[in-house]
Amino acid sequence: MSDRPFTKVIKILREVGLRPTRQRLGLAKLLFDGTNQHLTAEELHKAAQASNISVSLATVYNTLHQFKSAGLLREVIVEPGRVYFDTNLSKHHHFYFEQTGEISDIPDSQITIERLPQIPEGTSINCIDMVVRLGPVRGDN
């Protein structure tokens, strides 16, 4: 295995002020492989085990939240207890396929929001995240 992927991951972690520990390096290598991914902590934990990265589920959760706080990941909450971590940091929204639990991107340019409620005084809108839930087509009843 080339050292190049690890060098890139070490640089990414150091740029956001995170020490490149063995666990962070292993998880970051799985997350930041150059493709956009939506993973739950459990899915990342399974991928780590399959890649012989020795890490507990609690460490995966902690690391994902550290990466999110550092601006490396986006958190997508699709329902209570169901959180995905998204490596795509560009403005976009999501389709959530309720039957399979899969999530996919909707480009920001495909969503138009015409009117928003008045926001409380002293606050500003940081971003708007839309999750479009999809289920099977239902027949006429």
Image: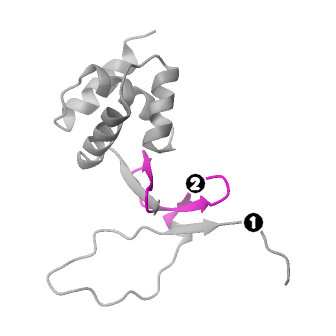
Q: Is residue 136 left or right of residue 104?
A: right
Is residue 107 covered in magenta? yes
Q: How many marks?
A: 2
Q: In this rendering, does residue 44 appear at all?
A: yes
Residue at the (43%, 62%) spot, across then down: 80
Q: Amino acid at mark 2?
A: Ser
Is residue 65 covered in magenta? no
Q: Nearer the viewer, residue 5 or 81?
A: 81
Q: Is residue 78 above or below residue 71?
A: below
* Residue named by callout 1: 136
Residue at the (44%, 48%) spot, across then down: 86
The range drawn in magenta is: 80-108
Which quadrant is home to the C terminus? bottom right
x, y (%) of residue 57? 38, 34
Image quarter of residue 126: bottom left
x, y (%) of residue 19? 18, 28
Where disc 1 sits, the SS reads: loop
x, y (%) of residue 12? 28, 32
Q: Amino acid at mark 1?
A: Pro
- Disc 2 to disc 1, C-alpha distance: 16 Å
2 or 1: tag closer to the N-terminus: 2
* Residue named by callout 2: 104
Q: Nearer the viewer, residue 101 or 125?
A: 101
Task: Say few, some or many: other residues with alpha carbon within 10 Å of mark 2 (under 14 / 14 to 19 / 20 or more).
Answer: some
Q: Is residue 69 left or right of residue 53?
A: left
Q: Nearer the viewer, residue 82 or 65?
A: 82
